[in-house]
Image (cartoon, rainbow, N blue to C red):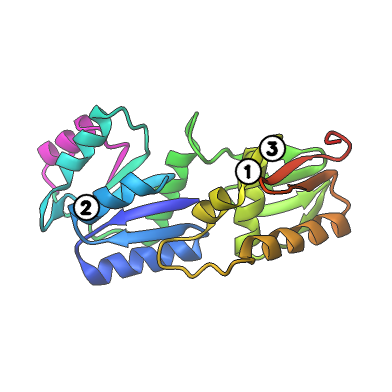
Amino acid sequence: MRVLVIEDEVELGKLVESGLAKAGFAVDRFETKGDGEEALAVADYDALVLDLGLPDGDGLTLLKALRAEGSSLPILVLTARDAPEDRVLGLNGGADDYLMKPFYFDELVARIKALLRRPGQALGARLTLGNLALDTASGQLSVGDAPVPLARRETALVETLLRRQGQVVSKSSLEDSLYAFDQEVTPNAIEVSVHRLRKTLEKAGAEAVIATIRGVGYLMTKAGDHG
């Protein structure tokens, strides 16, 4: 899953970016409202962490503009503004959650995941296909009752494919979901990750299979469902 962080405090922004990456998110971080708006225009995000006090404008203006456009992107406001009226303005402006600085980092991650578990959002509590199951809160994949260890990137890959099971997912869509702007993506990175995931699922006896649709992308289905 991909998260956009707009935070002008450089060191804090780096800490948030690093921590979210360790939690399994692909993260793009920017320090101005303008750069954040450009990122939102060209990439699809699962959540936005937004500071209100930005050097080129108020984050609240961006928040209201997104909601006025009909965006349902989960937005967590991260700010030092501690007056009750500021929290009311943020929530009334369309924020889904509001976290004060300084904050406990694990709480930030928990709040983002809670937003993504809401109906219609990116993070369901448990995804299944045949005897394959992924607990998205812990990142634990299992086949039947047996846990299947995966690298972080492969966990993100299987989650993306499970969320769109029965649908063809393009290579470019997978790259957008798994990699941030500043991460180098080798030409065969997705192919290598899919190959490793396939081998892992086969070895574990999973009923889910990943089919390659040449020239289009990848399709995760239950074994025997795809001709």
Q: Nearer the viewer, residue 100 or 7?
A: 7
Q: Residue 70 placed where, x, y %?
A: 31, 27
What's the residue type where badge 3 is placed? Gln
* Residue at the spot of label 1: 169
Q: Is residue 205 above or below residue 62?
A: below
Q: CA distance from mark 3 to mark 1?
A: 9 Å
Kindly report which numbered mark, 3 or 1, lies closer to the viewer in this rendering: 1
Q: Secondary structure at mark 1?
A: strand
Whether residue 59 sits left or right of residue 151 in the image: it is: left
Q: Residue furthest front?
A: 215
Q: Earlier in the sequence, mark 3 or mark 2?
A: 2
The picture quadrant where one finds residue 223 is: top right
Q: Secondary structure at mark 3?
A: loop
* Residue at the spot of label 2: 51
What's the residue type where badge 2 is placed? Asp
What's the residue type where badge 1 is placed? Val
Q: Residue at x 41, y 62 (%)?
A: 181
Q: Residue 154 placed where, x, y %?
A: 65, 60
Kindly report which numbered mark, 3 or 2, lies closer to the viewer in this rendering: 3
* Residue at the spot of label 3: 165
174 in magenta? no
Q: CA distance from mark 1 to mark 2?
A: 33 Å
Q: Earlier in the sequence, mark 1 or mark 2?
A: 2
Q: Residue at x 20, y 32 (%)?
A: 93
Quadrant for the C terminus, please.
top right
- Magenta-drawn segment: 82-99
| Circles 3 and 1 in contact, beta carbons < 8 Å | no
Residue 139, visible in the rendered structure: no
